[in-house]
Image (cartoon, rainbow, N blue to C red):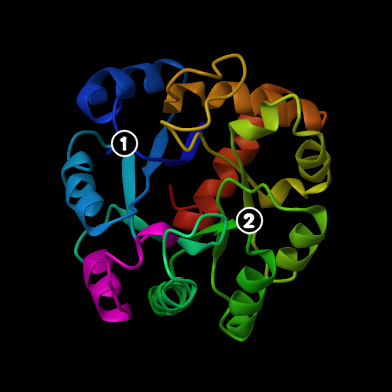
Amino acid sequence: MIDSHCHLDHEPLFNNLNEVIKRSKEVGIKKILTICTTIKSFKMIEEILKTDEIIFGTFGIHPHETEKNNVNKNIIIKNINNNTKLIGIGETGLDFYYNNSNKQKQIESFKEHIESAIETKIPIIVHSRSSEKETFDILNEYKNYNPKILMHCFTGSYAFFKKMDTLNAIFSASGIITFKNSLDLQSTFSKIPTDKLLVETDSPFLAPIPMRGKKNEPSYIKYTIKKLADLKSMTENEMINLTTNNFNKLFFNNEI
């Protein structure tokens, strides 16, 4: 069982890290990928990576943070190459739902991250909200370079899935798929091929039912796995094995 996307540098996770990791191991989690969003968060992640062997990390700038965190390909690659436990680039992408960062700044930052992922040959973690066309169009510019694309917390339309599937993307299900009003998203995930699936908590956000309303944490991944297994007519153990293998194939080429 693997949580492919969380934010251990956020509260209340950070100040309770030992307990959070203990509960994660108790439910059977073997790896946790904690995601960078700012330069400040990266400094915290570097320390978090030292706390337990099951924790891995990324370097990247969230689209909301691109105006305050200006990075280029050289900076991204330099940071990634400094630590073998940094296995992904992001989260990056586009978010036009809120006007938190200039659109052009987001696009420029996104391209720097994509080019870094291509050069380092490691996956890029993509955040896309209210920007399906632009996200696809930009990634499609790099199609011939075959970047490894992970669509984090995928909430897109089925049409968007079909387009991103032409780029060989992987799609991560969050606790949102457990929500009662997420029927369209549940329908989409029921149609996504099993070799394209991962699971995540995005904790401390988006706690799944029956924990909705609480602060999320990696151990709650079990509820998302159960729902995704139901949608795919699989057992929970089958879904655990499937998503674990998919994660290891994407990030470790099945070496671990």
Q: State which quadrant residue 78 falls in.
A: bottom left
Asked whether residue 25 is in view, the answer is yes
Report the front residue among 106 and 51: 106
Q: Is residue 51 left or right of residue 233?
A: left
Q: Amino acid at mark 2?
A: Ile
Query: In the rendered structure, which disc, 2 or 1, sits on the residue that comes first in sequence?
Result: 1
Residue 147 rendering spot, x and y as whole percentages: 54, 73
* Residue 195 vertical position relative to residue 185 in the rendered view, above or below: below
Residue reaching furthest to the front: 99
User: In this view of the protein, can residue 91 be seen by the observer?
Assistant: no
Of 167 and 126, nearer the camera is 126
The magenta stretch is 60-81
The residue tagged 1 is 8
Estimate the x, y position of residue 58 in percent, counting from the top left: 34, 55
Q: What's under tag 1, amino acid-wise?
A: Leu
Between 162 and 37, the one nearer to me in the picture: 37
